[in-house]
Image (cartoon, rainbow, N blue to C red):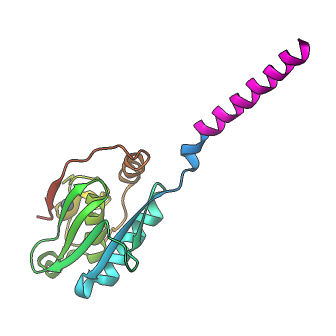
Amino acid sequence: MLIRKFAAAVFAALALGGVQAVTAAPATAAPRILYYDASQAQEFKAVVDQGAQIWNNSVTNVRLLPVTAGRTPNIRVYADNGWPRAYTSSLGNGSWYMGRQAVNQGYHPPRIAAHEFGHLLGLPDRRTGLCTDLMSGSSAPVSCTNPNPNATEARTVNTRFASASVAVPSKVYVWQ
Ligand SMILES: [Zn+2]
């Protein structure tokens, strides 16, 4: 009887350990991988990679990687003569355009690229006029060269990608 009680106690302790391991798992979970295709970004391929790298250096729950052969990209990047803009279908999925209209006006291309990726990562426009805000977009001066999300923007993206079940409505965001 004593042995049986002891065994039950050991089993309970093991089960508790198991529960603790499960609850600790999300903190060390692998980041969600989003593949992007910059093959149609024309002269902006390098700046698209730069925009992805900026996010990879700023957040931990999601990573933007160049798409590999045979894989369907989550994000397609194009270039044209219009305004930069993003089309989101769901969190982490859609497309965006590197628009020459903004580039020709002098807006900093790496900032545009990081901003448009920001939409694909679930951030809306916030036209605060502040250069320290990545999602202020064209409301910040043309002279603004900050391509990095601020701490709040990075935290918001990490929160969105902490759970796979966050729903983000499909939407179109235009630079100006
Ligand atoms: Zn925008």
Compared across the picture, whether 57 is left or right of 165 comes to: right
Residue 44: quadrant of the picture = bottom left
User: Residue 98 sits in which quadrant?
Assistant: bottom left
| Quadrant the N terminus occupies | top right
4 in relation to 149, above or below: above
x, y percent for residue 164: 39, 47
- In terms of image quarters, where does ligand 1 lie? bottom left
Left or right for 172, reference 132:
left
Extreme residue toward the right, this view: 2
Query: Image height check: is 175 above or below 5?
Result: below
- Residue under the point 18% across and 52% down: 170
* Along the line of sight, the residue nearer the viewer: 32 or 145: 32
| Residue at (30, 57) in percent of width and height | 133
Where does the magenta region start and end?
A: 1-23
Position of 55 compared to 108: left or right?
right
Please tell me which residue lies in front, 96 or 141.
96
Is 173 included in the stretch rendered in magenta? Answer: no
Instruction: Tell me if residue 144 can be seen.
Output: no
Quadrant containing the C terminus in the rendered view? bottom left
Question: Total marks drawn?
Answer: 0
Residue 32's spot in the image, x, y percent?
44, 57
The x, y position of residue 59, in whole percent, is 45, 58
Does residue 152 appear anywhere in the picture?
yes
Dominant SS in magenta: helix
In the rendered image of this protein, does residue 138 appear above or below residue 162?
below
Residue 131: x %, y % from top left: 28, 62
Which corner quadrant of the image does residue 78 belong to? bottom left
Seen as rendered, the residue at the extreme bottom is: 43
Residue at 25% from the left image edge and 47% from the top image edge: 168
